[in-house]
Image (cartoon, grey):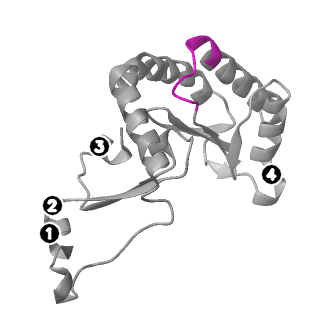
């Protein structure tokens, strides 16, 4: 569920927000190991307690939404059902790597970065001012897909609920837009 799990890392402190409620309500949480938690747990009279909080914590409605969202994840086996979509995405991204204007395709699960380059061999980037990523995203929008660039990197972060058919539309529109604008 978390990026740190892909790397086999167990952080001492982890901050969560947004997705914990499924995006319906604002909520954040700070998770810690027991050791860190115990380091801040003192008797109130000792004045050693670490008083902390977020602007998005403690709201009963938000907390109920978060618990319901986590229950849906568990009941509907959301992460397990995501695996075939990730495998499909991985397979379909291979053709992007063959484009002369794509320097690298980076993927971690359902998060993808497609780096657009002037020269595949040297991986020379387009000048920032050229806005090549913005141009591709405007073109793909004409095809009914909304994406965002980070400079010359086209970011794909489809919703977990996307179907394979919709994922194919997303990838086809992105590929053809890159071809039309850059290659």
Q: Earlier in the sequence, mark 1 or mark 3?
A: 3
Point out the frontmost of discs 1 and 4.
1
The numbered dot on residue 131 is 4
**Residue 34 lies in what quarter of the image?**
bottom left
Instruction: Determine whether label 1 and label 2 are within 8 Å by CB.
Output: yes
Q: Secondary structure at mark 4?
A: loop
Point out the frontmost of discs 3 and 4.
3
Q: Residue at x 74, y 23 (%)?
A: 173
Residue picked out by circle 1: 38
Residue picked out by circle 2: 34
**Residue 49 lies in what quarter of the image?**
bottom left
Q: Earlier in the sequence, mark 1 or mark 4?
A: 1
Q: In which quadrant is the N terminus drawn? A: top left
Camera sees residue 8: yes
Q: Which residues are magenta?
A: 158-166
Point out the frontmost of discs 1 and 3.
1
The numbered dot on residue 96 is none
Q: Secondary structure at mark 2?
A: helix
How far apart are the two marked residues, 2 and 3, measured between alpha carbons?
18 Å
How far apart are the two marked residues, 3 and 4, measured between alpha carbons?
34 Å
77 lies above or below 131 = above
């Amino acid at each position: 569920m978390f990026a740190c799990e892909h790397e086999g890392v167990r952080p001492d402190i982890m901050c969560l927000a947004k997705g914990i409620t499924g995006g319906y309500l604002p909520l954040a949480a700070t998770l810690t190991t027991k050791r860190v938690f115990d380091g801040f747990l003192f008797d109130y009279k000792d004045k050693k307690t670490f008083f902390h909080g977020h602007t998005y914590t403690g709201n009963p409605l938000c907390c109920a939404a978060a618990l319901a969202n986590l229950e849906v994840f568990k009941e509907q086996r959301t992460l397990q059902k995501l695996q075939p979509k990730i495998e499909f995405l991985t397979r379909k991204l291979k053709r992007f790597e063959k484009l002369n204007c794509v320097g690298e395709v980076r993927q971690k699960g359902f998060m993808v970065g497609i780096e657009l380059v002037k020269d595949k061999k040297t991986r020379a980037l387009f000048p920032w001012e050229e806005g090549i990523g913005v141009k591709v995203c405007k073109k793909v929008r004409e095809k009914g897909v909304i994406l965002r660039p980070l400079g010359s990197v086209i970011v794909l972060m489809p919703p977990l609920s996307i179907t394979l058919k919709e994922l194919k539309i997303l990838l086809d529109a992105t590929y053809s837009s890159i071809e039309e604008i850059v290659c």
